[in-house]
Amino acid sequence: MPPAHRAGFVALVGRPNVGKSTLLNRLVGEKMAIVSPRPQTTRTRITGIRTRPDAQVVFVDTPGLHPGSGRLAELMSKVAERAVEEVDLVCFVAEATEDPARLDHEALDRLRSSRAPVVCCLNKIDLVSPKSRLLPLIAAYRVAYPFAEIVPISAERGEHCDRLLDLIVAALPERPAYFPPDTLTDQPETFWVAEAIREKIFRLTHQEVPYSCAVRVEELTERRRPECLYIRAVIFVERESQRGIVIGKGGAMLKRIGSSARTDLERFFGIKVFLELTVRVRSEWRKDDRALREFGFLLTS
């Protein structure tokens, strides 16, 4: 008899900047989530799908588990908490460089609402030498929470990620695939365009500016003469001064953002991309439910 096919949903959760998005990209095998050295790059639920002959894993990357303040932070926290409640397995991602005496018990407490087993992924082991230094941290996590497994990994370098994927598959229920085998995500194309632009804003601007930006794609159409993908998008900021920073002197910063995003989008879509960007002010949009709904952040249920 052939081995049973397994399928299920797996949430990647943890504090900000522990490498959840990098791990999602590694496990799916494609760049599905934006990656930035800044915390709280991920604002919403991002789905990446890994299909093998024996299994299909639907990964859900979430905003970091953090208290936060303000309407947007509150919504981000709800997204993370719901993900824990609705999946077949949870991967709690933590840093292997943590002090065993200072575990984040608040983040661990948020896992207790999960009815699914939880695997602890100790990420960034490439920063730990010798590896024996991991033992006290592993022991501390075993005491702090009843994890099904604790797996030291490096999402950046791929160390032990294949073993983690095998453990994940083994923990999923026997059921048919949810999506066709060539599906990488259930998010629309416009979502990935907005994320690519937002990643460049995070990488190229500083201080509060990246967190004050939202991107809305207003047009995405294929053109034949010349053959290209035409994309028109708007970057929203909260203040006029931020608009000036994003545009830059003589439009230089906006050109850098657009050029860098276009390179990624052409690789993603496999076609030449014409990207038209404008910047508008939407005062205090992070506190405005209507704006949050427009930009895709407000939960509808």
Image (cartoon, rainbow, N blue to C red):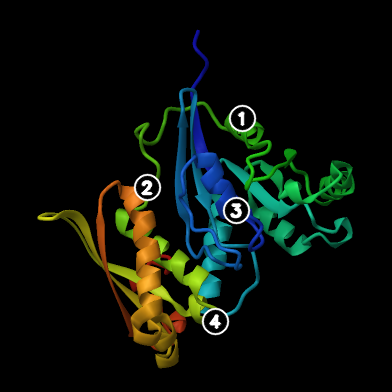
> What is the spatial separation of the Cα atoms under label 3 and label 2, in whole angstroms?
18 Å
Question: x, y percentage for residue 46?
Answer: 46, 54
Graded by Cα atoms within 10 Å as few (under 14), some (14 to 19) or many (20 or more), the crowding at tag 1 reads few
Question: x, y percentage for residue 74?
Answer: 55, 73
**Dot 4 amino acid type:** Glu
The residue that label 4 is drawn on is 208
Check whether the beta carbons of the residues at disc 3 and disc 2 lie within 8 A of each other. no
Please give left or right for residue 193 compared with residue 86 in the image.
left
Check whether the beta carbons of the residues at disc 2 and disc 1 lie within 8 A of each other. no
Check whether the beta carbons of the residues at disc 3 and disc 4 lie within 8 A of each other. no
Check whether the beta carbons of the residues at disc 4 and disc 1 lie within 8 A of each other. no
Q: Nearer the viewer, mark 3 or mark 4?
A: 4
First reached walking from the N terminus: tag 3 or tag 2: 3
Element type at mark 4: loop
The residue that label 1 is drawn on is 166
Work out whether 172 lies above or below 45: above
> What is the spatial separation of the Cα atoms under label 4 and label 2, in whole angstroms?
30 Å
**Dot 2 amino acid type:** Asp
The residue that label 3 is drawn on is 20
Q: Please name the residue shown 63% across and 49% down the image.
A: 114
> What is the spatial separation of the Cα atoms under label 4 and label 1, in whole angstroms?
40 Å
Element type at mark 2: loop
Q: Nearer the viewer, mark 4 or mark 2?
A: 4
Q: Nearer the viewer, mark 3 or mark 2?
A: 3
The residue that label 2 is drawn on is 186
Q: Nearer the viewer, residue 61 or 80?
A: 61
